[in-house]
Amino acid sequence: MLQGTGSNVGKSMLVAGLCRAARLRGFSVAPFKPQNMSNNAAVTSDGGEIGRAQALQALACGVPLHTDMNPVLLKPESDIGAQVIVQGRRFATAKAGEYYKLKPTLMPAVLESFERLRNAHDLVIVEGAGSPAEINLRHGDIANMGFAEAADVPVILCGDIDRGGVIAQIVGTQAVLSPADGARIAGFIINKFRGDPRLFDDGYALIENQTGWRGFGVAPWFAEAWRLPAEDALDIAEAPQTDGFHIVCLQFSRIANFDDLDPLVAEPGCRVTILPPGRPIPCDADLVILPGTKSTRGELAFLRAQGWDIDILAHHRRGGRILGICGGYQMLGHSVADPHGIEGAPGTTPGLGLLDIKTTMGGDKHLTEVTAHHAGLNLPFSGYEIHIGTSDGADRSRPFAHVNGRTEGAISPDGRVCGSYLHGMFSDDIFRKAWLGKSGAAGGAHSYQGSVESTLDALAAHLETHLDVAGLLSHSLTS
């Protein structure tokens, strides 16, 4: 189990790389994260949802996505509350204090999922959440040491040297852990080093001497990380393109399932801007994307507070194109009604009025992988649905796609405003190139999935070069 000295120290990337390294060594391997907090979910082969990072890790392992890989997923719906997904299905909506009382009851489901994976594979590589140094959360913990103790797995502690203070991160973590939890840590990894790792030899030795823990190596900064699907929307902004067809995606406060952007970031000839709050939509934008969100009505208020509603209308008047995906699709209509208060207080919120549709929240969550056929391009593509609510109106007579004989999505009369509930469509190379080409982009020959696979291989080689991977795997397989 890899745990971190804090959030965003690179645990997800390290697990993905080690998963691919273990697979290349001939092991049957699977990823596992007991508890994840993310609105960027993936639909699994068994019809549930897990965190997007575990989906990437499963790809690194070469195994189908399964809800057992992330048995508890928290999807924030407000500043104080979150939707609780257990083994892929909605279990409850809880405020922070309520979840603190609830989470100890979830340990049986967590261990059940873990045991199924452990029985099915040679090796399971587990990712922690946050940090075990948050000892105020130790009672009832299911994400870090509480799980490690219950499942009896060894722990490797990962520190982020790029942030500075990595010696204090690791030594300080040992200082606050109980003796039993400290004894469970088999060693440490230093991650995200820039420059010559030999310059940290003295610091590395100091950590080993201070803690008595074994060092498993120093992993330099992996420059190709931007080519891999990101779980945090802020990470997408690091993509290197600086010119070309300009795609602007609004960074909503509850942005969800933004993996739609990853293939666009990697597409030659495209420049993707994740627009943070407080900044106007650039006048040179060719395409504005309204992404998915966990709170459509709340996001409409957020959008208007930024003045983006005015910018979107101006962009449309200039001849620009607009794509709304899932919640973003709902926002493009005349109104979003929530009579039962599914996303908050019951009521109706005016939409942007760029599509002649109305949305009503309610019914069961649509959660399925689909094969669709784009109506205008006459091309198939794969994607997934993960939403509640239904949308209908005159513009539905011009569907975005057809799915199993039914129409899906809507297009405006001028063809420049499109909406769809389908996520993941741009992962299909042929469809992505054709759709972007029709929108005015000059794409190149690029295989997105091929790029992800080759980057995972490069990540595994990177870790094999700089970490004692043999020692890590040998220790894990004999523990």
Image: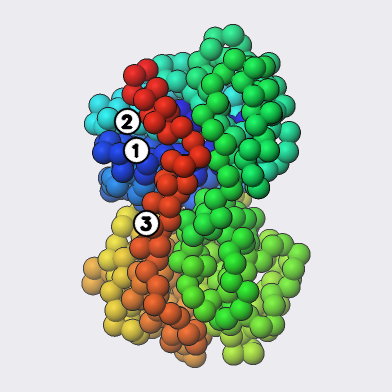
Residue 198 in view in this figure: yes
Q: Estimate the spatial distance between the alpha carbons at disc 3 and disc 2, rounded to whole Å.
A: 21 Å
Which SS class for mark 3? helix
What type is the residue that disc 1 sits on?
A: Ala
Local packing at callout 2 (Cα closer than 10 Å; few below 14, some 14-19, many 20+) is many
- Which residue in the protein does label 1 denote? 22
Residue 42 is left or right of residue 378, and the answer is right
Q: Secondary structure at mark 1?
A: helix
Callouts 1 and 2 close, C-beta under 8 Å:
yes
N-terminal of the pair, mark 1 or mark 2, is 1
Disc 1 crowd, CA 10 A, few/some/many (<14, 14-19, 20+): many
Q: Residue furthest top?
A: 179
Query: What percent of the width, then of the height, locates residue 26?
Result: 26, 38
Distance CA(mark 1)–CA(mark 3): 15 Å
Residue in the image at 49% along x and 23% along y: 155
Tag 2, which secondary structure? strand
Task: Please give the label number shown on residue 162.
Answer: none
Residue underneath mark 3: 453
The C terminus lies in quadrant: top left
Q: Amino acid at mark 3?
A: Glu
> In the rendered view, would you say 21 is above or below 125?
below
Mark 2 sits on what residue? Answer: 123
Residue plotted at (62% across, 65% down): 274
The correct choice, above or below, for 169 with respect to 42 in the image is above
Q: Work out whether mark 1 precedes mark 3 in sequence or the reverse, and give the earlier one.
A: 1
Q: How many marks?
A: 3
Q: Earlier in the sequence, mark 3 or mark 2?
A: 2
What residue appears at the point 29 percent right and 47 percent down from the top-left corner?
A: 62
Residue found at the far front of this picture? 198
Asked whether 53 or 292 is in front, the reply is 53
